[in-house]
Structure formats: structure tokens, C-alpha cells
Amino acid sequence: MAENKIVARPLSPHLQIYKPMFTMMMSITHRLTGVALFFGSVFFVWWLTAAAHSDAWFNLVQGFFYHWFGRLILFGFTWALIHHALGGIRHFIWDVGKGFELKTVELMAKLNLAGSIIFTILLWVLAYGVKS
Amino acid sequence: MSMKTPLKIVRGLGSAKSGTEHFWQQRLTALANLPLLVFFTWFIITHIGTSRADVITSLKNPLIAIALLLTLASVFWHMRLGMQVVIEDYVHGHGRKLLALLFNTAFVIVMFALSAYAVLKMSFAI
């Protein structure tokens, strides 16, 4: 009965067969930002361990993040973090059984994207304000 | 030998043998992450361009050190759960999948150990 033979079964159609839709892109972005944050966490651990280690290491890491390339990484990290967090709130709304109407789904996706951009810019304005 | 009926054993657990535990932990850590990340953002912003001594002074405050430790624990566990789903979706083949899952768990444990040790070292520094 239970034969472990590998049979070439037909696969269900994958992403490329579907027309790209906004909500679908936002779903993919939610996962991508999650993966990006996973690897991006290394930067924070790098900063923290450098602070625990020595002045020389800490200055090196601070210098890296002061450089435009380091700032670009931080900017991307900020956006990914906010986008993923807002996406998470969207999921909480669905978890309690609300917001499944197509109009609401579309609206929440738009708010998620707009919010992620607005909050990222606000945070960086605030950050530059704190520094100066 | 278990006296439970097959139905009793499988009820609520499903094919993953862990029921809704993964989903539940994922949502619990997600919920915890929201206030913790507000703290985290504040912590980062207030340490832009500061010296190492300033960071250590901040971490000497037990509330800040504890909040940071909680953030690390919740975020890293959430990361592990999330990456696990991604691996299960895209990495096929028993061996490769198992290896990827092991690396995933090892990664977050090492990251947590490094960062938690760093926080404690600075917090308890004389």
C-alpha cells in the first residue's frame, strides 16, 4: 500500500502564472522584508558586540554606519522594519476575523505601504534632529 | 503503550504533530515585538553618533538592559519561526530542508548568545 516511490506529480501553478496584483506584491514584500530583517539583525549584533568589546571596534562600527553606505543599509533596515511591523498589524486584524472585504483588504495594503514610507521618513527626520 | 485512541492522539495536532503551537508563538512574539520595537527605535535614535561610554552608561540602567534583553529574545524567536516557514516553503528534499532548519535555529541561538552577553557585560561593567 504505502510505497515510497517518487512520482512526478503535476505541480500547482506557481507565481509567474498569475497576474501581479497589489495585495499579492504586498504579501511578497512582507515575507521579503522578514527575510531581510533576519539577516539585517547581524548589523545590530555587530554594533552591540563591538560596544561590549573595545573603543577601537566600536568606532569602526560607528564609522561604518556613518558612511553613506552604512546609512543606506540603516535606511533600508528602517523601512523593512516598519513595513513588516505594519504588515503584522494587518495580520492581527485578519486574525480577529475582521477586514476580509476586498475593499478593506486593498485599503489596508495601501495604508501599509504609505505608512511604511511616511514613518521611515519621519523617523529619519527625527534621527537627524536628535543628532544635530 | 498508550491507552489513547488514535483520534485522541491526533486531535488538535494535525500532520505537523505540534498543532497550532507554531502559529500561536509566532503571533505572541509578533505582539510582544510591537512595544519592544518602539523601545528599540528609541534606543537606537538616542545613540546615534554617541561614544561607547554613553552606550555603556545607558545599559547600566537595569530597565534599559532588561528591555533590550527582552527585545532580543522575542525578536530572535520570531525570526526563527518566520524563517522556518520560508525554509519549509522553498527548500525541498529531506536532507537539505533539515540542514537549513538546523542552521536557522543555530543562527538565532548564536545571535542571541552574542548580543545577550554583550548587553550583560556592559550592564554589569564596573
Image (spheres, rainbow, N blue to C red):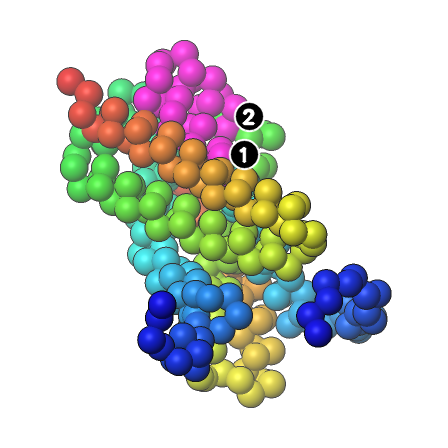
- Residue A30 image-quadrant placement: bottom right
In this rendered view, identify the residue nearer to me: A101 or B45: A101
Q: Which residue is mark 2?
A: A67
Q: Is residue B105 above or below residue B86?
A: above
In this rendered view, identify the residue nearer to me: B19 or A44: B19
Please rate how many residues cluster around mark 2, counting C-alpha atoms within 10 Å: few if below 14, some from 14 to 19, many from 20.
Answer: few
Q: Secondary structure at mark 1?
A: helix
Looking at the rendered image, the quarter that the N terminus of chain B falls into is bottom left
Q: Position of residue B111 (x, y in %)?
A: 43, 35
Looking at the rendered image, the quarter that the C terminus of chain B falls into is top left
Task: Please state which amino acid type lies under the numbered disc 2.
Answer: His
State left or right for residue A100 relative to residue B1: right
Whether residue B31 is visible: no
Q: Which mark is drawn over residue A63? A: none
Task: Report the span colored magenta.
Answer: A41-65
Q: Is residue A72 above or below residue A114?
A: above
Q: CA distance from mark 2 to mark 1?
A: 6 Å
Chain identifier of the residue bearing label 2 in the image: A
Chain identifier of the residue bearing label 1 in the image: A
Task: Please state which amino acid type lies under the numbered disc 1.
Answer: Arg
Q: Secondary structure at mark 2?
A: loop
Q: Residue at x 54, y 34 (%)?
A: A71
Q: Which residue is mark 1?
A: A71
Query: Is residue B10 in the magenta section?
Result: no
Whether residue A37 is visible: yes
Please rate how many residues cluster around mark 1, counting C-alpha atoms within 10 Å: few if below 14, some from 14 to 19, many from 20.
Answer: few
Q: Position of residue A66 (x, y in %)?
A: 50, 26
Q: Residue at x 73, y 67 (%)?
A: A3
Dots 2, 1 in contact, CB < 8 A: yes
